[in-house]
Image (cartoon, rainbow, N blue to C red):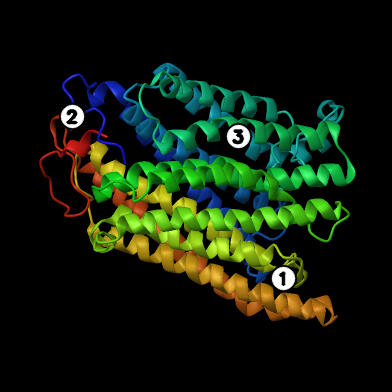
Amino acid sequence: MIDAPGTGSNAPRHESLVDERIVVAYFMIALGYLALSMLAGLLMALQLVRWNPLNGIELLSPGRWRMIHTNVVAYGFLANAFLGALHWAVPRLMLRPVLNRALSWFILSAWQVVILSTGVGIVLGPTLQAQIPALEKLPFSLGAQGLEWGETPVWIDPLALAGLLLVAVNFMAPIVRASGPMYVTAWYFMAAFVWTFLTYAMGNFLPQYSLTGTSAGAVGGLFIHDLVGLFVTPLGWGLMYYFVPILLGKPMWSHGLSLVGFWGLAFFYPLNGIHHFLYTPIPMFLQYGAIVATIAVEMVVATVLVNFFATIWGSGRAVVTNLPIRWFYTGMVFYGITCLQCAMQTTLTFQALIHFSDWVVGHAHLVMFGVFSMWLLGIMIYLLPRIWRTEWYSRTLSEWHYWLSAVGLFVMASDLTLAGVFQGYYWASLLPWDDSVEGSQPFWILRVFAGLAMMAGQGCFFYNIYKTWRKRPFNDAAAEPPTLATGTKSAPSPRASI
């Protein structure tokens, strides 16, 4: 990592760079959406094992709340948590505040309107349009679009795109004004601001208004995967390149290798998306290209993982003593497993077995919760005590939060992966469909309890946050931030200014 910026006498004070209130606001809103998404996921899980207590209630049907589950995770939890972390990392890295703090608060409010309107459109849109004659005559549907992860109603899409543009403008201002060498974190952030805007526009407008048939399917596949690889991934890895060296107190093992990871992501990832639609009428040369590009990306990811694990070499005890580092590196282990799965499941041979099975569901949970949510939760665990100038209320609750989350996720992902293999063989044997459903019941029951463990972990976290907030000092600015490794307060180090 570059030498700590801001340690000189001319460096701006931290208070002039970061609006800590908006960081906390984004984190609290994100955690609220995380709870909502988990409740929606539990509803789906209970439906599969025939334990749904809400059968017959149209507005609480699992079909609608499944879309709430995925959209709230992507745009409610991940987007808000990333925005909170960016409001901390970008000003401190570039030594310049965001373009406008009032704009930051406007974006926060406007983005919640977008998310809540999306939820209302998904749950209530079809019902309202069918029951109110004036709404029935509208030239567009108030409900969800028929695109995976792009279910956002058409009347929300322009607002969401405008919000993404404002986010890019607000954060790009301090980056483009910075002088001196550009650390790799800033490379990832700049790319994410551009890629996210273009990806959202491509996925939500082209299939809706311009493309049909296999062309729409190909673009839909690109959108599904690019939303992960060009929105979530660059922000996630960018934040890891920022926080890990600070917490370990040492530079990254190889700056050159970090750039290999960035340019490999930029070159190969946009070509991956069609691997979601193997064995479809999409031209085979596009399917083969997606397979090759996916395997290439996994090789690129290997260089990133090597870089991070080489960085912690010699400091392995930090995984035990430093809670955020434990969350970060657990996510990296899950990332390695996820990419190994990708390289396998993108082949035509393997895809013939696991296509449409619960393998895919397990894979999605492994990457979205096991990787990026683990990283974001680790960032919250690091930043909230620093912002409130106090220690966590309970180290025991923090440990329970970690172990219930990590073990629960590992059990769920392993369970669904195995379920997918069984389902594939059931279908290949040409047995009646009901046989595969009955054979899946033990796996689905275990998935319910694994999900409940993950929810219990977040419950520990929520309670710990509340109690920590209650015991923060009255004059936050006068207190010293705690160190996460020891749980005690210490004199600030040169790197504390980053």
Tag in front: 3 or 2: 3
Q: Is residue 113 left or right of residue 156?
A: left
Looking at the image, which residue sits at the far front? 256
Q: Quadrant of residue 158?
A: top right
Residue type of the residue flagged with mark 1: Phe
Is residue 255 depicted above or below 141 in this figure? below
Identify which residue, 11 or 118, lies in the foreground.
11
* Label 3 secondary element: helix
Q: Nearer the viewer, residue 334 or 299?
A: 299
Which percent across, then down, holds residue 265?
Answer: 57, 45
Left or right position of 91 against 347: left
Q: Secondary structure at mark 1?
A: helix
> For mark 2, what is the residue?
477
Q: Is residue 283 left or right of residue 269?
A: right
- Of callouts 1 and 2, which one flags the residue occurring earlier in the amino acid sequence? 1
In the image, is 184 to the left or to the right of 129?
A: left
- The type of residue carrying mark 3 is Trp
What's the mark number on residue 195?
3
Q: Which residue is mark 1?
A: 350
Of all residues, the one furthest to the left in this rendering is: 491
